[in-house]
Image: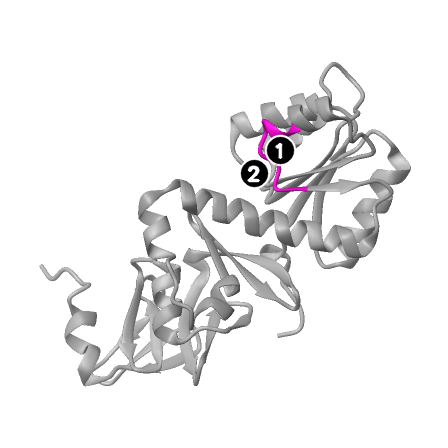
Amino acid sequence: MNTVSTQNQIQILVIEDEAVLAMYVSDLLENQGYEVVGTADNGREALTLYQQNRVDLVLCDINLKGDWDGIETIQNIIRFKPVPVIYMTAQTDKETVERAKQTYPAAYLTKPVRPDNLQIAVDLAIHNFVLRKVSASPDLGHKTTTTEKDHHSREAILKIEDKVFIKHNYQFVSINLDDILFLEADNTYTTLVTKSQKFALRLTLGNALNRLDFSDLVRVHRSFVVNIKKLKGFNEREMFIESFTIPLSQQYKEDFIGHFAFH
């Protein structure tokens, strides 16, 4: 559980016109456990890379080569598809800051870039972006309301569209909801299991199920929730997912069976 598979790593696009700095930032990100999908020194190349790859986060300098500066580049990128953005810049003049604010960046990094500031900025960027998306949706905003008791664990899981970001070893990792096999309760923690990894969440099983809000996840036991799309088979007392055997309790059997259409 100490490593993160490549498919779960946060994928980052770096847009920086100074080759040495782009390499330095890329090395820092990879040493911190992130994957750099590409680097670009101009806006048009950056947009092409963004359109061709899965990108979870963009780091962008404001001064770039070519006919687009960093702000114009981000405007074109988010017009294609919204993404959290961190601006890297030595420019702090009011006009530049005001232009940058129009693209709703999730965080700023002033140059020179320091490793500790970079990791904090990435963490904040993902967190702020997801919360902004959630607050913009009345339905999602209602579902993510937490009690004071749950406040400590509210950062454990962030959902956006068909994937979630989960805090693992002090950084966020990306998990597609379809990749979840099952959830298992462990006192006040819940273990989320995929085919390749396990993740510990500081949430009860019920809270984890509510926060994931994924219709294919079904409670089958007081200690288990399964992804019914991953079932290989089941009988009166248990079910089979990959190499795992999950108990089926009488209490949840009727609801479980109700998810199947019989002809």
Check the picture and name the quadrant holding the C terminus: bottom left
Please report contact status of discs 1 and 2: CB closer than 8 Å, yes or no.
Answer: yes
113 on left or right of 131: right
From what the image shows, is residue 133 above or below residue 47? below
- Badge 1 density bin: few <14, some 14–19, many ≥20, Cα 10 Å: many
Residue at point 27%, 76% (across, down): 220
> The residue under label 2 is which amino acid type?
Val
Kindly state the secondary structure of the residue where label 1 is placed. helix
Q: Is residue 104 above or below residue 141?
A: above
Q: Nearer the viewer, residue 57 or 109?
A: 109
Q: Position of 45 compared to 101: left or right?
A: right
Query: Of helix, strand and loop, which mostly describes the magenta segment?
Result: loop
Asked if residue 26 lies in the magenta stretch, the reply is no
Asked if residue 212 is positioned above or below residue 79 in the image, the reply reads below
Q: Earlier in the sequence, mark 1 or mark 2?
A: 1
Find the residue positioned furthest to the top.
67
Q: For mark 2, does the 10 Å Cα neighbourhood hold few (<14), some (14 to 19), or many (20 or more) residues?
A: many
Which range of residues does the magenta coloring cover?
Answer: 100-107
Residue picked out by circle 1: 50
Type of amino acid at the residue the image marks with label 1: Tyr
Percent coordinates x, y for residue 57 in the rendering: 63, 43
What secondary structure is marked by label 2?
A: loop
Near-viewer residue (83 or 36): 83
Residue in the picture at 81% in, 21% down: 65
Please state the horizontal and vertical placement of residue 3, each as a whole percent of the image: 67, 69
Residue drawn at x 79%, y 25% is 63
Compared across the picture, whether 15 is left or right of 169 comes to right
Q: Residue at x 36, y 49 (%)?
A: 140
Residue identifier under label 2: 83
Identify the residue at the far front of this view: 94
Quarter holding residue 64 = top right
